[in-house]
Amino acid sequence: MRVIDRREVFLSAAALSLIGARAFAQSGAEVPVGVIYPLSGANAQIGVDARHALETAADIVNKSFDLDLPTAKNAGLAGLGGAKIKLIFADHQGDPQKGRAEAERLITQDKVVAIVGAFHSSVSATASVTCERYGIPYVTADSSSPSLHKRGLKFFFRTTAHDEMFSIAMFEFLDAQRKAGRKIDTLGLFFEDTIFGTDSSNVQRKLAAERGYKVVVDIKYKSNSPSLTAEVQQIKTANPDVLLPSSYTTDAILLMKTMDELGYKPKNIVAQAAGFSDKAFFDAVGDKAVGLISRASFSLDMAQKRPSILKVNEMFKARAGRDLNDNTSRQLMAVLVLADAIDRARSTDGEKIRDALATTEIPGNRTIMPWKRVKFGADGQNVDADPVLIQYVGGQFVTVYPAAVAVAEPLWPMNT
């Protein structure tokens, strides 16, 4: 009787895996990936832009491009014999329970192997729990609530920074400005009443106390409020050196319009992105937001350090008619990170894709982001997703912090 050694077993397993991958591709099967975004309602434009970004990413995966990005050079997923990613979209309408139901439908009916979402942290909170129950990876591209990765979920992954990381960068920027001789003593907090706003404000309140800033106005308001007149009156009376708002698009637009109507020009705004980085915001009130600073994960002027940015931006712009921004860049990159994991897993099994995500290590220069790398901790958080701060001047955003990647000095105060 012939003894079979380990090497033969390993080679046989590898051969079977290769045969399986070829058969998978030859069968014409696609790899279904669920996508949950607000495609209708108050934040529908966010969902429309996200769709353009995610479909651009799918093109990068499914076709062959001379880009130094994960899965870009091969046409399709090499680990599955060139099989293609198929995105299946669902509309959560900004409703956490709708998001939960849509996640379950995508898993049970559309048989998706993973889900990407969802902009709103409140929706990611419910949808990711559904994915956990079914053993399907949930990759959030843009939901930034710090609590999301602290729930002990095994199948949750976040490629981008969370609001603690963003807020630390914001306060380090304020510290640097104060060290340079600029007067920054008082802060104003303005935040919506969802998990995004409340988590953001909790972090900022803590950092303000630790770093010696006085919070002179602290306003929690109802999301999608019909009026912010009373709130803006409070801000105007307190007149903080810096206003730190955390709002989605419709509220951000209403805030700026109300401040203008009441004749109030804040000294400085350093925003928690979200609505303040959305093109719809600048289309509506850009003339009132000159000098606004936002935390970010992306800026086009990073192209000098990330060569793939310009080509990818051209591809996105051909679909969307606009440039990549903080939201769409993160959404695009999340699909590439997920595709890389599916490719390495050589499988559509949720557990194997999850294990591949857990061992991801993509250098920053192989992304379109300013990150050091993509590497997930045990809690699913990418700890090397370095934020930047960008300022709206001359009809566009420029990077103003940190100094290592800044292309301009900040305009300070914003209303000079």
Image (cartoon, rainbow, N blue to C red):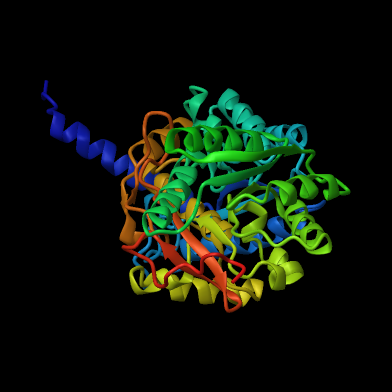
Q: Position of residue 56 (x, y in %)?
A: 56, 65
The quarter holding residue 404 reads: bottom left
Depth check, front residue: 140 or 6: 140
Q: Quick check: 354 left or right of 116? A: left
Q: How many marks?
A: 0
Q: Quadrant of the N terminus?
A: top left
Residue 82's quadrant in the figure? bottom left
Task: Check the image and report above or below for 340 versus 380.
Answer: below
- Where residue 288 sits in the image (x, y, percent)? 71, 69
Instruction: Please tell me whether residue 172 is drawn above or below residue 409 in the rendered image.
Output: above
Q: Is residue 23 left or right of residue 416?
A: left
Residue drawn at (58%, 45%) of the image: 187
Identify which residue is drawn at 59% across, 63% down. 292
Q: Nearer the viewer, residue 47 or 401?
A: 401
In front: 98, or 262?
262
Q: Residue furthest right?
A: 226
Which quarter shows the C terminus? Answer: bottom right
Across and down, in percent, residue 391 comes to 53, 66
* Residue nearest the viewer, comparing 102 with 32: 102
Residue at the spot x=67%, y=55% of the render? 275
Left or right of 100, for residue 233: right
